Amino acid sequence: MTWTPAPADAEVLARRTALATAVREDLAAAGLVVVPHDGIPSVGAGAHVHVDTLDDESGGGVFVEWKVHFVLSSAAMDALSAGGRENDPSIRLAGRAKGAMRDAMAEILSVAGYTVAKNADDMAPYQLMVSERHPSPSWREWLDTQTARRQEKLTATSNTRPPDDEPDPP
């Protein structure tokens, strides 16, 4: 019998997509550059958050990794292709940058209430797996409060404006 990876169901994918969105927002709120989820990860530098569509048993989940600039990535790949080892400056810088940023992102996400695993895949040593977020007070509550207060002020201003005080159309 041959094992075949199975796709995750729609409910699991919806949960993962929501989790990935929250991860992107929290990393951006912490000041990190986040590669747009619909962008091309090979040319974007920063935190790359993606949803693997396989089921949990097949290795699916939400994953985060740091993408170095494509110039450094290309230089490191060229050095590896030419037989370069870890003493090559581009390989060393790319690896150390990815490792440092993996650790920083793991700390940021842990503080933000996520469950994060650093070594979920031995074939992707710089990748994080994010499995869940524990609800806790965050910057989102502040933003929601500010947005609601602003909306209340706009509504109050609109309600007190005389009907003939309509702005001229552009």
Image (cartoon, rainbow, N blue to C red):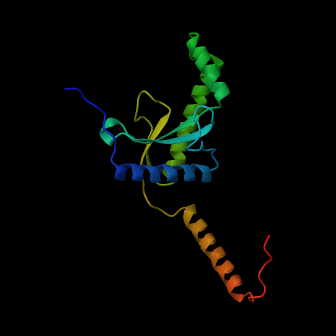
The residue sitting at the left extreme is 1
Q: Position of residue 127 (x, y in %)?
A: 48, 35
Q: Position of residue 72 (x, y in %)?
A: 65, 25
**Res. 93 image quadrant:** top right
Q: Nearer the viewer, residue 156 or 166?
A: 166
Q: Is residue 151 visible?
A: yes
Q: Position of residue 137 (x, y in %)?
A: 51, 64
Name the residue rendered at 64%, 20% in the picture: 75
Give left or right: position of 65 versus 58: right
Q: Quadrant of the N terminus?
A: top left
Residue 20 position (above or below residue 122): below
Give left or right: position of 114 versus 75: left
How many numbered markers are drawn?
0
Q: Is residue 132 visible?
A: no
Name the residue rendered at 58%, 37% in the picture: 101
Residue 72 position (above or below residue 114): above
Q: Nearer the viewer, residue 169 or 97?
A: 169
The residue sitting at the front extreme is 169
Q: Position of residue 138 (x, y in %)?
A: 54, 62
Q: Quadrant of the C terminus?
A: bottom right
Give left or right: position of 68 versus 7: right
Residue 26 position (above or below residue 66): below
**Res. 81 image quadrant:** top right
The residue sitting at the top extreme is 83
Name the residue rendered at 25%, 29% in the picture: 3
Name the residue rendered at 68%, 79% in the picture: 153
